[in-house]
Image: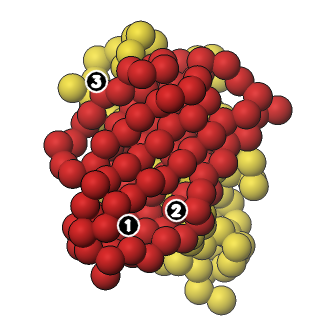
Chain colours: A red, B yellow
Amino acid sequence: SQTIHQWPATLVQPVGSPLSLECTVEGTSNPNLYWYRQAAGRGLQLLFYSVGIGQISSEVPQNLSASRPQDRQFILSSKKLLLSDSGFYLCAWSVLASDTQYFGPGTRLTVL
Amino acid sequence: AQSVTQPDIHITVSEGASLELRCNYSYGATPYLFWYVQSPGQGLQLLLKYFSGDTLVQGIKGFEAEFKRSQSSFNLRKPSVHWSDAAEYFCAVGYNNAGNMLTFGGGTRLMVKP
């Protein structure tokens, strides 16, 4: 069966520090991968999605970036965090773009 | 462009009462429709989905949803709510179009009174 992992589960970082969040999927090949963010009390905001290794599409221009160095690995990064980057970050995967998305457990990021 | 509306941001029901969460979508084609649930601090869990066929779909945890094409709706229902159902619920829509990703509604936060 397929599983999706995210780490770390929680993270507290100072403003201006770098960020690296990792997402890995097991049990499937060539998945579509997604990064979402939920700010406090807000809905899901799609940040990035990837249909294959090295293929990243950005939905929202900001100081975050994403990379997909391996088929089942998706990384969210920042060189300098802002206070507004605080939130709950969710990774998801799907077989097809229009099909069911399966979500990881999320990472709670607090920028102080 | 496709869009999904969940008109109710917050809903409070008493334990044991029935529940209906509303979801409306806008687009011309027949959609793929989903309901997800998110407990605090957790990821989203799929409750049910509709692709085709019977318009009344059964899901996990006693939930069901009905696709009504004429109303562009896919409302989520449960006949008797349990305190553990308190969570945030998201409706999502997709289409059988390569590269056309799911669009999520803004969510409805359900609170359950004892």
Q: Amino acid at mark 1?
A: Gly
Q: Position of residue B5 (x, y in %)?
A: 31, 47
Instruction: Specify the label residue A107 is tagged with.
Output: 2
Q: Which residue is mark 3?
A: B27
Identify the residue shown where x is 34% and y is 61%: A18
In the image, residue A53 sits, relative to residue A17, either above or below, namely above
Identify the residue shown where x is 62% and y is 40%: A24
Q: Secondary structure at mark 1?
A: strand
Q: Chain of mark 2?
A: A
Quick check: do tags 2 and 3 share a chain? no
Q: Nearer the viewer, mark 3 or mark 1?
A: 1
Q: Secondary structure at mark 2?
A: strand
Label whose residue precedes the other's in the sequence (2 or 1): 1
Q: Chain of mark 3?
A: B
Q: Is residue B94 left or right of residue B54?
A: left
Q: Quadrant of residue A73?
A: top right
Identify the residue shown where x is 31% and y is 43%: A65
Q: Position of residue B10 (x, y in %)?
A: 39, 71
Question: Could you give the CA–CA distance between mark 2 and mark 1, rounded to whole angstroms?
Answer: 8 Å
